[in-house]
Amino acid sequence: MIMETFQTPQVDPSLPKEETHIIEESPEYNHNGHNGHNDKRLHIVKTLTKTVLARHSTRIFLDKPVPIDVLEECFKLAQSSPSSTNVQPWRLTVTSGPKLDRLRELMMEAVIGGEVSQVPPIPDQFRHYRSDLGHTLYGPEGYNIPRSDREGARKAQLRNYRFFDAPVVAVIGLPDTLAKADVFSVGLYIQTLTLLMTERGLGTCLQVSTAGYPGVIKKELGISEDTTILCTMAIGYEDESQHLNIFKMARDQWKDHVKFVLD
């Protein structure tokens, strides 16, 4: 549900203590002592760092409406995201209330009815990432479902297609006339949007699995056929009492993904 009245956005304070020192007060920021410009710059960098580290996937939401003013502010700011030749290829359809409830029902019908997902399989060399996520998500740190409980695992899996019962869902796509290279511009937009929402105390969960049923989503929400649906985003206030919302997957060492060529 989207609430029409405005509420003051709250900054999410969650951040592991051991990560609060990640920004050093180097001469680059402090060479003028208490210079206001440099102090402000340091504050902005620290705030961004905390927000990046605080962002995580939310899978259990409170039954609490999201003020439309907060959503509109996030969308307005995210529109400043960079894109190739400034084409701004992202296309969002935001839904809530009875329309979203109906979409949940139709998605569940499609999945339970055996409709084949259009999400392509992950190449073999990347499958271990999904496997690790599954072990953590369904293990003691997540849903805590025993391997023998197939019915419980299936029930938890189906929550994906209810968008985790979030009060707001954004469907994110781009015109199919654009090149594959333009997808990265949408990625930049999504990253900006999730950080803005995290900064305002909103939980989010990006879902590619739901994009496997584009026909259902397009028909129910009136999305044009020439739009490629990339993912959906569940949005709302997270239930902080649920440990499922606390865990974060480990990341590779950055040096495994970044190569310097200097000589």
Image: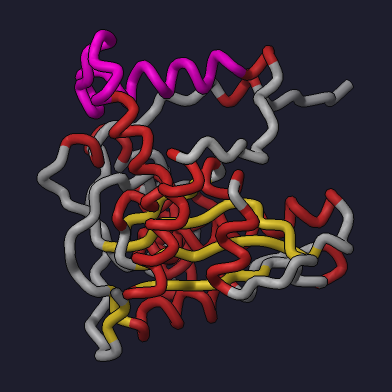
Q: Does residue 157 lie above or below 201 as drawn?
A: above
Image point (84%, 49%), residue name: 180
Image point (34%, 74%), residue name: 98
The image quadrant of residue 66 is: bottom left
Q: Does residue 223 lie above or below 214 as drawn?
A: below
Percent coordinates x, y for residue 106 in the rendering:
45, 57
Q: Residue furthest left?
A: 241
44 horizontally vs 64: left or right: right
Q: Nearer the viewer, residue 53 or 227?
A: 227
Report the magenta residues as a range: 127-152
Q: Nearer the viewer, residue 107 or 120?
A: 107
Percent coordinates x, y for residue 129 in the rendering:
53, 20
62 horizontally vs 138: left or right: left
Image point (34%, 28%), residue name: 154
Residue 76 in sight in this render: yes
Q: Nearer the viewer, residue 259 or 142?
A: 142
Q: Does residue 253 lie above or below 89 as drawn?
A: above
Percent coordinates x, y for residue 206 in the rendering:
48, 49
Image point (38%, 57%), residue name: 105
Which quadrant is the C terminus positioned in? top right
Percent coordinates x, y for residue 202 in the rendering:
31, 62
Which quadrant is the N terminus positioned in? bottom left
Q: Is residue 130 within the magenta segment?
A: yes
Residue 32 in sight in this render: no
Q: Residue furthest bottom?
A: 5
